[in-house]
Image (tube, coloured by chain):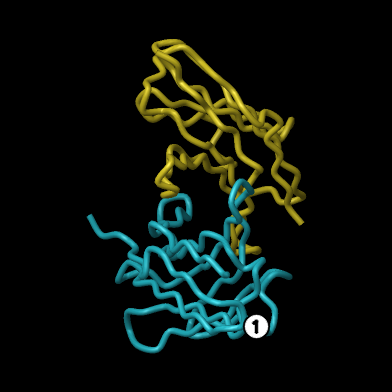
């Protein structure tokens, strides 16, 4: 079974600064997919960024980038130039075809301060 | 852009009553999912559905739960006799086989309150 751990329950950052959210996972699978989802107060689940395990290059989406360390089973999210609208819960999630389900971490509540 | 829709957005029910939560997945998607999020907790997998049958289910998904795809568009989650602890946000998701990185598209959720 896969597990996903987010060790930071809450974080805060000043507007325009950079913040990194941590995620580690445990699996015996070799090919899998990792995601970061954002959940604002509306509780909608919004995909922020995704990474396939066999791709060595770290994914980037505008101000969002990941640091994927496969050997360490680490998948951190970096948010650059933080904006007030980035305030939300962030969930790291793991998917493997054999399991056909997303396994989520416990989430990190991010507060961006003006 | 196509999206997953869910109805109702909020359902209030009495303990012991049956509820049906409805979802319309994206039309060309073939895998369908239900997830649950109790307030303040993480999102938990309930069940996946493919080719008109359950493909995976979690320990949470006991005999009180069932899923159905009654027609070509709707995907429903039924809770037969609701308990207080069923109060949660329920998310439907769908994906297409071979889609980019197997991304699952989530609906906006149904907030279920059991009194």
Looking at the picture, tell me which residue is in the foreground, B37 or B47. B37
Q: Position of residue B108 (x, y in %)?
A: 38, 57
Q: Residue furthest bottom?
A: B70
Q: Position of residue A38 (x, y in %)?
A: 46, 39
Q: Is residue A42 above or below residue B49?
A: above
Mark 1 lies on residue: B64
Q: Is residue A32 left or right of residue B23?
A: right
| Rendered image quadrant of residue A112 | top left
Q: Residue furthest left?
A: B1
Looking at the picture, tell me which residue is in the foreground, A71 or A76. A76
Q: Position of residue B16 (x, y in %)?
A: 61, 83
Q: Residue at x 51, y 59 (%)?
A: B89
Q: Is residue B9 above or below residue A93?
A: below
Q: Position of residue A41 (x, y in %)?
A: 43, 41
Colour for chain A in the figure = yellow
Q: Residue at x 58, y 56 (%)?
A: B37
């Amino acid at each position: 079974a896969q597990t996903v751990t987010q060790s930071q329950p809450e974080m805060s950052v000043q507007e325009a600064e950079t913040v990194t959210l941590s995620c580690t996972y445990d699996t015996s699978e070799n090919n899998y997919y990792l995601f970061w989802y954002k959940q604002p107060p509306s509780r909608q689940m919004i995909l922020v960024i995704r990474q396939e395990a066999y791709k060595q290059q770290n994914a980037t989406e505008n101000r969002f980038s990941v640091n994927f360390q496969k050997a360490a089973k680490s998948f951190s999210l970096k948010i650059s130039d933080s904006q007030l609208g980035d305030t939300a819960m962030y969930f790291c999630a793991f998917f493997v075809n054999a399991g056909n389900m997303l396994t989520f971490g416990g989430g990190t509540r991010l507060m961006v301060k003006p | 852009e196509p999206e997953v829709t869910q109805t109702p957005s909020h359902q209030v029910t009495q303990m012991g009553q049956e509820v049906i939560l409805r979802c319309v997945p994206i039309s060309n998607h073939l895998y369908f999912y239900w997830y649950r999020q109790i307030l303040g907790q993480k999102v938990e997998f309930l069940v996946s559905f493919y080719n008109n049958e359950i493909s995976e289910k979690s320990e949470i998904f006991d005999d009180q739960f069932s899923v159905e795809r009654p027609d070509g568009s709707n995907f429903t989650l039924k809770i037969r006799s609701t308990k207080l602890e069923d109060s949660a946000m329920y998310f439907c998701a769908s994906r297409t086989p071979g889609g980019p990185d197997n991304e699952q598209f989530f609906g906006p959720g149904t907030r279920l309150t059991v009194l």
